[in-house]
């Protein structure tokens, strides 16, 4: 089972590649707070990516799950409710992977024993499975950067090396 936080869904929807998740993982689980952030708040602001995610939910390959609301907020520091609920859901359903981009949230989730990766992992996996080609992954990463996604020059260089092999 795979759980996702908001940002991987939004970025993939903005790239026009949300379906990559369906192809690679079949089904994605999200907590209610992520649905609220990605779909309800996004639709309120008129964002197309919100409608794309909403369609995936109505098609059934993204499933919204309720998580227990009893937790110690001090365990999670300053991360937002979507990230907290994504981590909690991943723990509750014993997810084999949590898709989460925020660095602090990823550190917290990994400290709780979760296998946490971000959108770059998804794009690389899609590349290695030949779902997208070299040009598409380069264009996708450039687009992510233009959308405000932060990536270190070192990591960008490693990705370029990996796809050049």
Image: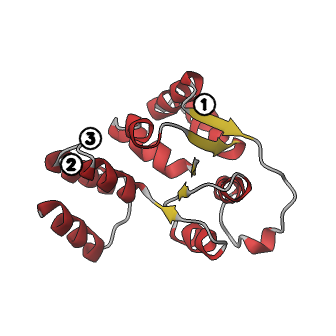
Q: Judging from the image, what secondary structure is the residue with disc 1 in?
A: helix
Marks 2 and 3, how far apart at CA? 14 Å
Q: Which residue is mark 1?
A: 44
Outermost left residue:
164
In x, y percent, where is residue 63?
63, 35
Which residue is located at x 63 percent, y 44 percent? 30
In the image, is residue 134 above or below residue 14?
Answer: below
Residue count near mark 1 (Cα–Cα under 10 Å), binned few <14, some 14–19, many ≥20 = few
Rendered location of residue 12, percent (x, y)? 40, 43
Q: Is residue 148 visible?
A: no
Residue nearest the viewer, comparing 156 with 1: 1
Q: Quadrant of residue 162?
A: bottom left
Residue topped by disc 3: 131
Callout 2 crowding tier (Cα within 10 Å): few <14, some 14–19, many ≥20 = few
The residue labelled by disc 2 is 139
Q: Position of residue 137 (x, y in %)?
A: 23, 50
Q: Nearer the viewer, residue 109 or 54?
A: 109
Place of residue 102 in the rendered image (x, y in percent of width and height, measured from the top left): 52, 64
Residue with the most extreme right position: 70
Eye-nearest disc, 2 or 1: 2
Nearer the observer: mark 2 or 3; the answer is: 3
The colour mode here is: secondary structure
In percent of the image, x 67 and y 72: which residue is there?
112
Identify the image quadrant of the C terminus. Answer: bottom left
Which tag, 2 or 1, sits closer to the chain's start? 1
Cβ–Cβ under 8 Å for marks 2 and 1: no
């Amino acid at each position: 089972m795979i759980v996702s936080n908001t940002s991987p869904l939004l970025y993939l929807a903005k790239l026009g590649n949300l379906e990559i998740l369906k192809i690679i993982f079949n089904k994605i689980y999200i907590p209610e707070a992520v649905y609220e952030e990605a779909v309800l708040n996004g639709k309120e602001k008129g964002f197309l990516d919100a409608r794309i995610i909403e369609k995936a939910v109505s098609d059934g390959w993204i499933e919204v799950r309720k998580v227990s609301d009893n937790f110690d907020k001090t365990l999670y520091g300053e991360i937002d409710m979507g990230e907290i609920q994504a981590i909690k859901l991943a723990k509750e359903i014993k997810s084999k992977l949590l898709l989460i981009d925020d660095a602090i949230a990823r550190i917290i989730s990994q400290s709780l024993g979760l296998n946490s990766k971000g959108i770059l992992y998804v794009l690389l996996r899609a590349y290695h499975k030949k779902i997208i080609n070299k040009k598409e992954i380069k264009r996708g990463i450039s687009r992510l950067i233009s959308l405000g996604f932060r990536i270190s020059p070192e990591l960008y260089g490693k990705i370029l090396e990996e796809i050049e092999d």
